[in-house]
Amino acid sequence: MPAIEISGLTKTYSVGFWRKTERVGLKDLSLNVEDGEIFGCLGPNGAGKTTTLKLLMGLIYPTAGSARILGMPVHDPSVKAQIGFLPEQPYFYDYLTPNELLGYYARLSGVPAGDLPARLYATLQRVGMSEHADTQLRKFSKGMLQRVGIAQAILHDPKVVFLDEPMSGLDPVGRREVRELIETLRDEGKTVFFSTHILSDAETLCDRVAVLHRGELRGVRAVSDLVAASAGKNEVVIQSPPNADLAALRALASDVRTVGDSLRLVVAAEKLDAALDAIRAARAKLISINPLRGNLEEYFLEHIDGARRKEVAP
Amino acid sequence: MTSRLYHIAFNTFREAVRDRVLYNLVFFALLMVGSAPLFSTISIGLERIVLVNLGLTAITLFGVVIAIFIGIGLVSKEIEKRTLYTVLSRPVRRWEFIVGKYLGLAATLIVNAGFMALGLFAAVLFVQRSLGMQDTYILIALYFIVLQFLVIIAITLLFSSFSSPLLSAIFAFGVFVIGNFADDIRGFASLTEGVQRWLITAVSYMVPNFGSMNVVSQVAHGQGVALGLVAMNTLYAALYLLAALSGAILIFEKRNLK
């Protein structure tokens, strides 16, 4: 049974003074997230990532479609005891200390009173905040609040953890720590669903990613497939005279882009020798040849634009 | 369920107690009650009447201001600051959140009224040198004041469930003022005819009749309060606040939290 099942989930908002204009927040989203998987939801701002998370948390109601977590409808209170949620740019009751805040949330989640002190200490230690357990949250930096936010999401040992932009506001050290934390959640067998627009984080962590754009799902793919798809390709960078004839070289490349005064070409390994001959014939200057490793950025851009962006030199 | 209600209520109470604005209001209320003996020295022979009138009115007004001031932000602030997200993503039903917040603010106001009442009784003791049977009626007046608080919090929550904090405050304060004149409005309705009479009567019955819960002048003069009125006011306040709270819950249950 998938940990998360989303079927035809749609959310439209009525906007304007008379609320007659409809704005699509999410359109017909269907996907499954398997048990124990780290699933990344990618997209630029306004893509529908937060809308998806709010629908899964039952904070907003869908216009159409449905979602189930651990086989139960999202509004079922018993499912909520088994999930953890970190909202985007979280803000907590700043008059409380982390101990008081986590104590409050733990009680609402039904953590037994006897387990509380040990649970609070262990969770705060896990996010590196045990030294600040009794300082009011209003004195915390954005990064410290983010850590408290992650602590409240994992405090009650949930089976599925939802994180909305978990790296936001963190310095490089903090980001690495959160990455490691998410990896330990996977090692513990938890399912993690997180949204981000930082592609390198998703690439490092995720088993699979979904790309959302303007409320629509543009693609779902395993990160390992992205790497495999580009195996055996090379990136060739050249600089050529203004009127050089590059037709033969272009014909050998699967992708050509102009970056500044350089031309970047993607050439298959078996065509590399022919490409080098074509470069010499055109009297172009070879800058570099590197084996290509497929990355998430390419996949992301390809799906955001609907087609791979090609920028061909005039 | 009870446990969750208690924890939400306790957190609301804790927030109010740690809010410095609340301390200022209580400080001013206590100052007003404390200064009552000074006022009463001006009115020879009327010390107790002036003192009790002034003290109970101060407790009412400050309590209503606190109820509206905190009540308007009780839910809207949680939505605006998104603190609600991490509560409602737990096994907490939306109605439990509203009722918990209501109980927390009610507890805050009862504790405040209790402290201010202690100040009033201390002032009465200072003026009279002793407390008599007539002073126990002050407790009934205080009970009615608390009933007014309970109703006004529910009304504020109802307004804030569909309008902005500023409008909610204006509406709630308006209802409080009109509710104090509900009997007068009914009297005015009897002077009119036709649709006008019907409309004014309807309005006078829709607003809570705070006038019937105001026995301040009566107890200031040392007069008792009929037990029948205590029972009727209790029942009336209970029904009114349940209706207002149910309305707030119904709206909040359907609301999309942006």
Image: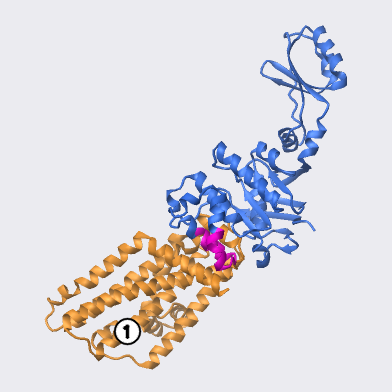
- Asked whether, in this view, residue A179 is left or right of residue A38, the answer is left
Question: Is B221 rendered above or below residue B246?
Answer: below
- Asked whether, in this view, residue B247 is left or right of residue B15, the answer is right
Which residues lie in the magenta part? Answer: A101-119
Label total for image: 1
Residue B52 rendering spot, x and y as whole percentages = 24, 80
In reply to whether residue A204 is colored magenta, the answer given is: no
Q: For numbered disc 1, what is the local secondary structure?
A: helix
**Quadrant (top left, top right, bottom left, bottom right) of the C terminus of chain A:** top right
- Quadrant housing residue A183: top right
Q: Mainly helix, strand or loop, the magenta region?
A: helix
In reply to whether residue A110 is colored magenta, the answer given is: yes
Residue A290 rendering spot, x and y as whole percentages = 75, 21
- Quadrant housing residue A20: bottom right
Residue A287 rendering spot, x and y as whole percentages = 72, 14
Residue ID at (43%, 89%): B232
Chain B: its colour in the image is orange
Chain A: its colour in the image is blue
Which residue is at the far right? A270
- Asked whether, in this view, residue A258 is left or right of residue B79, the answer is right
Mark 1 packing: few (<14 Cα in 10 Å), some, or many (20+)? Answer: some
What's under tag 1, amino acid-wise?
A: Leu
For label 1, the residue is B139
The answer to whether residue A19 is visible is no
The answer to whether residue A144 is visible is yes
Residue A100 rendering spot, x and y as whole percentages = 48, 60
Q: Chain of mark 1?
A: B
Of B141 and B179, which appears nearest the observer? Answer: B141
Q: How is the image coloured?
A: by chain
Residue ID at (81%, 34%): A228
